[in-house]
Image (cartoon, rainbow, N blue to C red):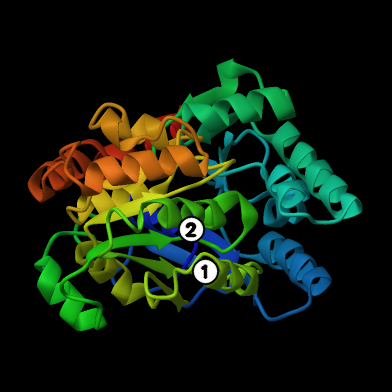
Amino acid sequence: MPGGLNRYVYELTHHLASAEDQVELCGIGLPETAPHSFVKLTNLAELNTPLWQRLWLTRTNFASRQAIKPDAINLHFSLYSLPLLSSLPTGVPITFTFHGPWALESEQEGHNKLGVWVKHWIEQRVYHRCDRFIVLSKAFGHILHQHYQVPWSKIHVIPGGVDTHRFQPSLSPQQAREQLNWPKERVILFTPRRLVYRMGIDTLLTALAKIKSKIPDVWLAIAGKGILRDSLEQQVAELGLNDYIKFLGFLPDEQLPIAYQAANLTVIPSQSLEGFGLVVLESLACGTPVLCTPIGGMPEILAPFSPELITDSADAEAIALKLEALLSQQIAMPSRVACREYASTNFNWYKIAQEVRQVLLA
């Protein structure tokens, strides 16, 4: 599955582009521009080249490209923004969309201290050059302010959007299960997560072990790859969950909306640094409720809609208690129609793109 950052940039770019506003998207590993598009794609380097070469090509190709002076510049990732700094035109407002603390994430995932320091240094250099910032949640606004000393006066909170054409309840749960060859008669939980510590899959497995005797037909599908795959499979065996868990590995992009529709409930058990939670919106847009931990920006999405879908804490006991209450219908889950209407009304890309445009051009 493409990462949330890539999906966000793709959707935002195409919703900003119009006959009045032409947008140039510069990036790594981009295809040629699609015909009849108001988006000009400029590929600066290929993903399969060594990092040093990729950064050098990014710098030289950006500086040498033929382009008129833009009205605004929007940067999204500090690693590839750093080589561009010397070539950015003066007098043009530069907005950085902060998708997460790169160095902090690396530190929590156990990367070496030197690598974490370098990432933090790169972030600080890039942020110092920017005039204003967009964050997708208040939670990440606080991190940007506290860890990078960016004043609140420069920070604008604008949530992400969801592609309501791609993510929609177009199938019945049974039809979706047939397409994926998933069990037809079980209560299905779905979680699309990278298999790293802060995503909380190990905590979710512990929670599932606590409720399996009370909800014996529960079945969890886990989509994603990561360094914890082997240890998570070992945990499944130790907890006696072999009949309750399916590791899907890499889930093809076209199957993601089907998987949401096949599930009774999407579960996002994040333990830290969950800046927004695009998967929360995608699931709701498909008509499937979401249970999340009170981490990062996810509660900001769910609290106005259904605060019962937020656990009291991020530990296994709290997740288990809420899962049991929802799956045994002690707490009513929102309907497919209600989930869809909330996502499409409050997080449609047309509305979000207009808010972003105002910040970029201010």
Q: Is residue 23 left or right of residue 173?
A: right
Residue that mark 1 sits on: 236
Check disc 2: other Cα within 10 Å, few if <14, some if 14-19, many if 20+: many
Q: Is residue 346 above or below residue 7?
A: above
Q: Residue at x 9, y 67 (%)?
A: 172
Identify the amino acid type marked 1.
Val
Q: Nearer the viewer, residue 214 or 294?
A: 214
Q: Residue at x 80, y 67 (%)?
A: 56
Which x, y percent locates residue 159?
39, 36
Q: Nearer the viewer, residue 56 or 249?
A: 249
Q: Are marks 1 and 2 in contact (CB under 8 Å)?
A: yes
Residue that mark 2 sits on: 205
Please tell me whether mark 1 sits on a helix, a strand or a loop. helix
Task: Check the picture and name the quadrant holding the N terminus.
Answer: bottom left
Q: Nearer the viewer, residue 116 or 347?
A: 116
Evaluate whether residue 22 shows in this view. Answer: no
Q: Is residue 336 above or below residue 181?
A: above
The disc at residue 36 is: none
Q: Is residue 217 left or right of residue 4?
A: left
